[in-house]
Amino acid sequence: MSTATHRIDRAAMAIAAGLLVIAVVIVWDASSLPSTVYGIGPRAVPILVAGGLVLLAIGNAVLAWRGEFPEREDYDLQAVLLILGGLLALIAIIGLNGGFIPATAVLFAATATAFGRRAILTDFVIGFVLSVLVFLMFSKLLTLSLPMGPIERLL
C-alpha cells in the first residue's frame, strides 16, 4: 500500500477562485439589467456565461485538489510584456480618441510579435485590415458603436 501524498496545486486553485469571482461579478451586474415578461431577455447570455465560468471553476478546483494538472512550461516574460504593452496602447489610443481601428491594429501587431513573428509592419497592416472589417461589421451590419477616431469617421 502506497502512502503517496498529493499536493494541491495552489496556482490552479487561485485560478478557480478567480473564475468564481468573475462569475459572481457577472451575475451581480446582470441583475441590474431589465427583465422581460416573455422570452429571453438581456440577462440570459450573461447568466449563461457565468454558469459556464462556475463549471470551469469547479473543474479547475477538482483538478487542482487532485494535483492532476500537467507540468507547466516556463513563460516568456518578454512576450507577456509585449501583450500587456499592446493592451495599454489600445487603452491609450482609444482614450486619446484615436479610434478602434488603429488601437486594435497595434494590439494585433504586438500580440503577433509576442508569439514570435517578426514582420511587425506586415502584422500591423493585417491587423488594420481585420480591424476595418470588424468595425464595418459592428457599425454597419449590427449597428453597434465602437470607439470613433479620424479613420472611423471616414468610413
Image (cartoon, rainbow, N blue to C red):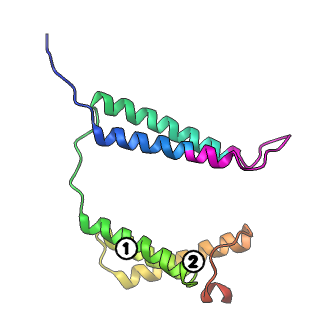
Q: Which image quadrant is residue 76 in?
A: bottom left
Tell me the CA gap for discs 1 and 2.
Answer: 16 Å
> Is residue 46 visible in the rendered structure shown here?
yes
Residue occupying the point 70% across, 73% down: 139
Q: Label 1: how many residues lie within 10 Å, few (<14), some (14-19) or many (20+)?
A: some
Residue occupying the point 33% across, 40% down: 12
Say above or below: 41 vs 131.
above
Residue occupying the point 42% across, 40% down: 17
In the image shown, does 100 or 11 lie closer to the viewer? 11
Rendered location of residue 6, percent (x, y): 22, 26
In the rendered view, does 88 fall on the left or right side of 130?
A: left
Which residue is situated farthest in the top direction here? 1
Rendered location of residue 147, percent (x, y): 62, 76
Q: Is residue 42 magenta?
A: yes
How many numbered discs? 2
The segment highlighted magenta reads 25-44
Which residue is situated farthest in the right direction here? 37
Which dot marks residue 85? Answer: 1
Q: Label 2: how many residues lie within 10 Å, few (<14), some (14-19) or many (20+)?
A: many
Q: Which image quadrant is residue 50 in?
A: top right
Label 2: which residue? 100
Say above or below: 128 vs 69.
below
Say above or below: 88 vs 75.
below
